[in-house]
Image (spheres, grey):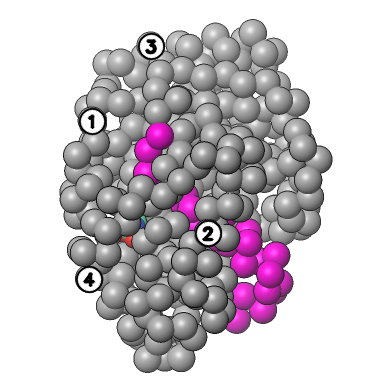
Amino acid sequence: MPSNADLSEIVATIGRDMADHLGGGKVADYIPALARVDARRFGMAVITTDGEVAETGDAWIPFSIQSISKVFTLTMALERLGDDLWKRVGREPSGSRFNSIVQLEHEHGIPRNPFINAGAIVVTDALLAGRAPAAGIAEIRDYVRKLADVETIDIDTEVASSEAATGFRNQSLANFMRGFGNLNSPVDDVLKVYFNQCSLRITCRQLARAGLFLAGAGTDPISGDVVTTSKRARRIAAVMMTCGHYDASGEFAFHVGLPGKSGVGGGILAIVPGKASIAVWSPGLDEAGTSYVGAMALKRLAAATRWSVF
Ligand code: GLN
């Protein structure tokens, strides 16, 4: 474990080094409201289990959480349903893009894992369980607020509307699964919640804080709150490692070696079990929808701290 001074220096150096790469990758444009973000942004925040924070760049600017929200909804759903959740969604890497439909027919509407869109939509349905969409949205928002210890985290309604207006693939996935009996609430209700959870606005600082319970074996090391059991925290981290970056999860494990979850808003949450929670943000994406500069920064951080779990 680097000392706090060393960690601050490592993070500051990464911030300086990333300046040469800003604007790399391609901003997600299939959600029009995301395409308007400044591609040259970069932020990183690291919070250790003893509460030390190191950050650089735009760590204070809110961005769209997108698929990183799936880590929090998975945790909520496991707490609520326990292992029964695994009857409706698998935990194998898909090797396919995040919005692919190809495996769903062969696998009878049971998505490969909770991080591809189909799997996350099932998790959202499991959480909704008969509630009105507005109540489901508020529960997820409040859960993230509590974990981040920030009451002002909210949903960017413009992004949510933009997703709804262009979410044809997600509608296909949801209808297909409903056809297989793996979605209980009406498709429009489930997608409304899903689009809103993806549209939460959060900063690197807040996101790193919200993920800290996973570094603390399920217990938030600062508040002492038991968010989940240590066994579940380990399993959530395992799914992040194997499935967190879709068809590029192997690449991320190879280069960074930490459980992580990307979002097409350009954020990545990475966990160092027992040690730290890290959030990076830079909007340009690689082919798999992972932040290009963000992943580069995490690779440098993992190398400098020797934090890879391998
Ligand atoms: N809201 C996005 C979608 O459903 C999330 C995708 C992502 O971040 N990978 O397409």
Amino acid type at mark 3: Arg
Element on which disc 4 rests: helix
Distance Cα–Cα, label 3 vs label 1: 18 Å
Residue 134 can be seen, yes or no: yes
Distance Cα–Cα, label 4 vs label 2: 24 Å
Q: Is residue 309 above or below residue 41?
A: below
Amino acid type at mark 1: Asp
Question: Which residue is label 2 attached to?
Answer: 138
Element on which disc 1 rests: loop
| Upstream in sequence: badge 2 or badge 3 | 3
Q: Around disc 3, counting alpha carbons within 10 Å, would you say few (fewer than 14), some (14 to 19), or many (20 or more)?
A: few
| Upstream in sequence: badge 3 or badge 1 | 3
Q: Residue at x 72, y 31 (%)?
A: 49
- In the depicted view, which residue is nearer to us: 111 or 161? 161
- The mark found on residue 168 in the picture is 4
Question: Which residue is label 1 attached to?
Answer: 38
